[in-house]
């Protein structure tokens, strides 16, 4: 799976930043306020599902997201379309339409709605610029020049914008600028909690950059294994990571290191029966004991 679809799992959660401030109290129309409140509630469900998919129990979140996409979202979108047709200069209504499209996993129309918001309000909203860039990248399956420009606008407002740094790193990597990609991802890694899935993703991508001798070159297996070992030393609570490390050492013919990894893994997960079973199965398959 390429990075753009994978990072899409984070998309819904990160978009909340761009749409957090909602001036509902300024609305005098009860009907309009009720509609936008419904949009907020729906979007919060989308954020919860997207975040839970990435951080929690995927099968539960996927089931909720599927129900959301086929019923509530598709029912809300026509109402929001009708509202923006009645009030084409209502930036907030366009925002909610963009949110609904995101929850419905329609990146193309979400990007169009966000572009309308930017046209109405001007640049300077870093969260919106970042969300717009993500929608463009999600739709294209790559960081297009237009998406790059949106992320650059986001960083101009907030140099710590996580999505902008991640995607701009992807763009630099695609151009062969490994040093530029590494700089962005290392800065993001420093701001990302070690327990977050994004942390591991960044470590793996930085390992790939380090292991490549040059643009288009094949990865260096020893360097990649060394990076995996370093990551597990810093954060040993990854049972599957230990299995990967054992297998990698075995493939490289470094049996002693594979056995050492097995011993460390068993000690780390001494109270986890499932992990112990996985380690025993791997040890048997790799002939480590």
Image (cartoon, rainbow, N blue to C red):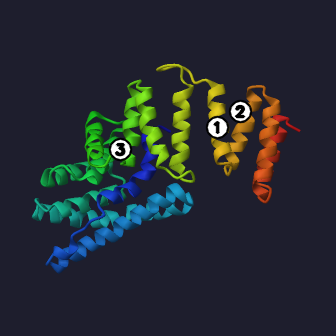
C-alpha gap between disc 3 and disc 2: 33 Å
Query: Which label's residue is closer to the chain start, 2 or 1?
Result: 1
Relative to 136, say whether 174 is above or below. Answer: above
Compared across the picture, whether 203 is left or right of 266 comes to left
Secondary structure at badge 2 equals helix
Q: Which mark is residue 164?
A: 3
Secondary structure at badge 1 equals helix
Asked if the residues shown at circle 3 and circle 2 are in contact, with their CB atoms under 8 angstroms apart, the answer is no
Please tell me which residue lies in front, 61 or 122: 122
User: Which class describes the residues within 10 Å of circle 2: few (<14), some (14-19), or many (20+)?
Assistant: many
Secondary structure at badge 3 equals helix
Compared across the picture, whether 68 is left or right of 192 comes to left
- Residue 26 image position (x, y, % from top left): 16, 74
- Residue 23 image position (x, y, % from top left): 21, 70
Residue at x-position 31% and y-position 69%: 40
- Residue 116 image position (x, y, % from top left): 17, 52
Q: How many marks?
A: 3
Compared across the picture, whether 21 is left or right of 236 comes to left
Q: Most extreme residue toward the right, as rendered?
A: 289
User: Which class describes the residues within 10 Å of circle 1: few (<14), some (14-19), or many (20+)?
Assistant: many
Residue 5 falls in image quadrant: top left
C-alpha gap between disc 2 and disc 1: 10 Å
C-alpha gap between disc 3 and disc 1: 26 Å
Q: Quadrant of the C terminus?
A: top right
Give the residue at mark 1. 228
- Residue 149 image position (x, y, % from top left): 25, 38
């Amino acid at each position: 799976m390429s990075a753009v679809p994978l990072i899409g799992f984070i998309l819904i959660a990160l978009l909340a930043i761009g749409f957090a401030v909602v001036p509902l109290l300024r609305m005098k129309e009860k009907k309009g306020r009720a509609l936008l409140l419904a949009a907020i509630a729906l979007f919060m469900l989308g954020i919860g599902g997207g975040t839970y998919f990435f951080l929690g129990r995927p099968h539960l979140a996927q089931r909720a997201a599927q129900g959301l996409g086929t019923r509530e979202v598709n029912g809300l979108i026509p109402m929001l379309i009708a509202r923006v047709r009645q009030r084409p200069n209502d930036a907030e209504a366009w925002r909610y339409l963009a949110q609904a499209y995101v929850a419905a996993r329609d990146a193309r129309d979400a990007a169009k709605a966000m572009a309308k918001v930017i046209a109405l309000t001007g640049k300077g909203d870093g969260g919106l610029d970042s969300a717009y860039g993500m929608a463009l990248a999600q739709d294209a399956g790559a960081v297009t020049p237009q998406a790059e420009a949106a992320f650059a606008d986001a960083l101009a407002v907030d140099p710590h914008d996580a999505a902008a740094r991640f995607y701009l790193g992807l763009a630099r990597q695609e151009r062969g600028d490994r040093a530029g990609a590494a700089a962005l991802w290392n800065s993001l890694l420093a701001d990302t909690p070690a327990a977050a899935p994004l942390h591991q993703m960044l470590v793996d991508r930085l390992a790939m950059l380090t292991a490549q001798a040059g643009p288009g070159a094949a990865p260096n297996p020893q360097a990649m294994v060394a990076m995996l070992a370093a990551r597990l030393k810093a954060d040993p609570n990854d049972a599957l990571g230990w299995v990967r490390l054992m297998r990698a050492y075995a493939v490289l013919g470094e049996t002693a290191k594979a056995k050492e990894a097995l011993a460390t893994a068993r000690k780390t997960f001494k109270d986890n029966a499932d992990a112990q079973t996985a380690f025993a199965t791997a040890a048997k398959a790799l002939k480590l004991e």
